[in-house]
Every structure is written in C-alpha cells, then in structure tokens.
Amino acid sequence: MLKQKALIDVLGQVNTSGVDGSWLFNKDGLLLAYVGSEQKEVASNVSAALLASVWTALERRACDLRESILVLEDSTIAFTLVARTMLLAVKAHKNADLGMVRAKLHSLSTYLEQPILSISHDLI
Amino acid sequence: MSSKRKVLLMGKSGSGKTSMRSIIFANYIARDCSRLGPTIEVEHAHVRFLGNMVLHLWDCGGQESFMENFLMSQKDQIFKNVQVLIYVFDVESREFEKDLRYYQSCLEALLQNSPNAQVFCLIHKMDLIEEDKRDETFKKREADVLRYSELAATPLGERSNAVCQCFKSSIWDETLYKAWSAIVYHLVPNVNTMEDKLAKFGNVLEATEVILFERATFLVIAHAVLSPHKDPHRFEKVSNIIKQFKLSCLKMGSKLDSIQVRNSRFTAFIDTFTQNTYVMIVVPDGKVSAPMITMNVKNARKVFEAIETKQ
Amino acid sequence: MNVQQSLEELMLAYEGICAIFITDHDGGLILNVGLPATLDNSKFRQQLILSHLTTIPQIHKLKMGGHKTTFAMYESQQIAIHSLCKYYFIVHAGPNANAGSMLAMREKLVAIANQMMSVCPPIDGDAMMPTSIASAAAPPDFFD
C-alpha cells in the first residue's frame, strides 16, 4: 500500500537550498504526488504529463535511458526512472548547484525503489 | 463449493414480491414491473450471489388458493430447511387483519420446520402513503406484525428471535435497497472479517468510508465507516443510483467499470474489486491522486479475493 | 574564426566526445563534426534531431522559460543539446565523458554561435548583430 502522506513527507525532504519541487508520476503521465512551491502557471499534474512525454521521446532514441536533465531559463529539472515503471523529477532554481540536485534525485530514487517495486511488481 | 440458501418470499397476492425480486436480481427498473402478472403457485429462482452462494428464492403465489395449499398439503416441502423468510405486506391492504393471520400461520409453520430461520417483514408500497404520514403508518403496522409474531412464537417456547425485523419499502425509491441489503447482510459469511479488513484498508488510504457492494445487485455487503456521517440512508441511495447507471450502461451495450466523483470537499472512487464485488472509497480530499488510489485498490484486491474464496 | 576547426578542437579537447553537430530550429543540419567512426551516423542523427524537436514544444508548455540545454544519460552514451541563438548544438559522447564539462561546454559554444550569427544573420529578425545571446529557443510570443 502506498500512503499519500508518507510519500509526500519523503518527497518534501529534498526541497531545500534551491530545490523547490519534486514529482512522482508514472510513465503515462499520471501524477501520484507533487510536493513543492505552488505551481501558478502550470498545474503539477500537467507538468507531470509533459515530463512523461519528454521522457518517452528521449527513450525512443535508445531504450537504455537512465536519467535526464533539462536546463531552462528559470529552472532546472532532473528526472530519472524509479522501479522500472515510474518517474521521479526534481525541480531547482536556475542558480542551484547541479551536482547537489542530482545527488538529491539519486538518493530519493534509491529510497523509493524498493517500496514502489513491491507494490507495483505485478501491475506492469 | 457452493452453498445454497433457501429464501422464502411470501405474502398476499399483488403485494409486490415478484416486482421486488425482478428489480433486485433481474435488472428490471421500476417501470418494467407493470408488465408482471400474478405468480402461479411457486416460482423458483436460483440467483447467484457473491460468486459461490446460491439464493434459492421461492416466490410463492399469494392468491388464497395457493396460500391454503402451502399451509396444508405442501407445508413440509415449503417450510423445511429455510434460512430466511421474507414476508411482504401491502400497506394499502383493506384486510390487514386477515393478512396478519396468514402471516401468523406461515410463521408457525416455519418455526416448526426451520427453527433457525431469520424472519424479515417488508411493509411494501409505501410510496402510496402521503409522505408525512409514512412514519406513523409504518410504526403502526410494525407494532401489529410484531404482536402477531409473538403470538406465533410463544407456543414454541424458547424461540427468542421469532421477533422479526420490519422494513418499509417501495420499488420507487431506495428503501427497497435498504431492506434487501439488511436481509442479504445476514446471509454473507465472514462479514466481520471483511469489515475488519475494510477498516484497515480505509485507514491506509485515509478514507472516511469504504463500502463493498455485491456485483450484480449492488446491495451493500459490508462497510467500514471511519468517520461519522450525517445521512444514515446514504448506502441505499448510492446503491440505487449506481444500479440505475449500470443499467443504462448495459442498455448501450457496455459494462460499468469504474466511476470517479470529485468536488472540492471529497473524492469518491467506485471500482470493480473482487470477482463478485464492487468497492467504493470516499476520501475527504478533492485533490487526491487517482493513480495512487487505483494502485492501492489493485493491491488490496488480492487480500479480499482470498477471503472470498475461503467461504 | 573557422567554425569547423573550432568545433573540432573543442571535440578533441574533452575526453569521450565523439561528435558535435549544429542544426537550425527546423532540424536542418548545418555542420557535422565527428570522429571517423561516427561519420556514417546520419540515420541516428535524424532520429536524434526529430525526437528533440518533438520535446521542444512540450518543454515550452512547462512555462519555466526558454530551453537552454537538454541532457540525456543512457547506459551506453550521453547526449547534450544546447540551444544557442537560432541553433541547436548537439553533443554526442560516450559514457565516460565528463557530464559537468558537457554541460559547461555551453559557454565555449557561445563564441561559435555568435560567429555564425554574424556570418548569416536570421532573415526574420533585425539584421544587426546580437550583442548578447538571444533567449535560447525562446517560445514565440503568440504561443498557446
């Protein structure tokens, strides 16, 4: 069972020093949880869907995509695969140090890997 | 392993037994019931319920000649091995005393042949009474029925639960579902285990209610209420609404799979659950993530399917 | 400045980089510089450009500003796509290349991009040389 509150706690832990949002969503773009600064312009479930489709497009080139980073004018987003079927994305302010952002992404995904794998292993 | 339950449906001719049965078990809508004619002798219906339970409904014709027969020559055949007796009273009947006497005879016959049977009395066709007089009328009838039940039971001494449960009902509103849900609730084995597990499930999801409906009839089989609610009639209302919706879907050639209802204060998910049930989960958060709940429901399915196959 | 030469120097300066190519915003190839082994990779290039072009409008819908860089890390390769002026600079490298330097390479590519803009300024913009890098692959005003 996945508890919404527990998931939100875990995701919220990376939102410090420059990192201001994290999403957990599946490859179809359906958002499971978003924790972070209020998304005024684009709703969190819309951005989850957009990120999922960007991932799918990048995956088309070669099936072994592990991680991706989008550097944009106002923010940087790093995202990676978790438990084979879900995507984890972390958003940071443009001045945040990329190495730290990636480190946070990796520690979150390692932490979430087992729990998510155990509840979704037969749903693929 | 299928378990058969014999359910007797009795009452005067024209009291509404066949209509009720058709709506609950045969996907009729209230309007369709005008087509039904009087039942001849006994109509047997075997209804699958909850997968491996078979409800053997004896819809006994209410015309006087048949009633005489049942109580005389066919007494043993009819009244043996019964789990549940449902006796239907037409609230508008002009011969209520006579109805009650027939009821008493049936009850006596029942208690002699199936001492452990449960008895439910439905005061039916309540829609024909003016709304503000309904409660009063029901209470009066209920008192009479209970009195006659005592009369039937006292000669047999120890039988303490001869006192039956009375419900008011009408095919035109949700009271029909309330009555039949209560009846069916007593027939479901493992109800307590299921409700415990439902409560645990609801806790994990942080839901305010989790309800289990039987798949074909949408009668409530089990529920866990984790947070009190003002309206005690909500279960039957929901049964009624979803059943109507399911029937409309069937008319268009498609089967109902799942429904999600959201507003700013809550989200409700109705989804197919085990082979024989639907589950309804109400969460007090209008923005809860649907895929998360769907994923949790999928995982819970396995546990509940295991409970079901144990019975 | 010889653009081709500068690109080659850049490519050889960093370990692991096997190709750099430049395209315009519609995906038309402008320049391709690569190690001999990668020279017949036109099919791969086309696929790369196409998939990048499909991601651009979606990235704009995120409303987080214009696109600067996309960096994708695969098991067997790394690809960085930088938007500079009116061009996309696509850098293809093996798994052993330094990710940080691939991202930082953007700074070095600025000069090359500026040079290219001065040689063939865009027809739709004003013909003056941009004094700073134009907002990289910025979403058009009438978007959405």
Image (cartoon, grey):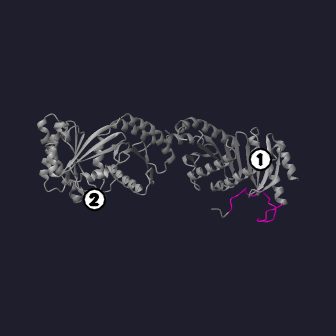
Point out residue B165 in the picture as x, y percentages from the top left corner. Answer: 22, 44
Residue that numbered label 1 is attached to: C91
Q: Chain of mark 2?
A: B
Residue C123 spot, x, y in % from top left: 79, 65
In the picture shown, does residue B156 fall above or below B220? above
Q: Is residue C82 above or below residue B74?
A: below
Most frequent secondary structure within the magenta stretch: loop
In the image, what residue type sits under mark 2?
Arg
Inspect this view and state whether residue B146 appears.
no
For the residues beneath circles 2 and 1, the answer to whether they share a chain is: no
Which numbered disc covers residue B213?
A: none
Position of the N terminus of chain B by quadrant: top left
The image position of residue A34, as x and y in percent, is 56, 47
Asked if residue C122 lies in the magenta stretch, the reply is yes
Identify the element where label 1 is drawn: strand
Instruction: Please report the residue visible at 58 percent of the width from the left and 42 percent of the height from the top.
Output: A85
Q: Nearer the viewer, mark 2 or mark 1?
A: 2
Q: Which residue is mark 2?
A: B35
Q: Amino acid at mark 1?
A: Val
- Looking at the rendering, the stretch of residues picked out in magenta corresponds to C120-140
Image check: C97 left or right of B264?
right
Inter-mark Cα distance, 2 to 1: 77 Å
Q: Is residue B213 left or right of residue A66?
A: left
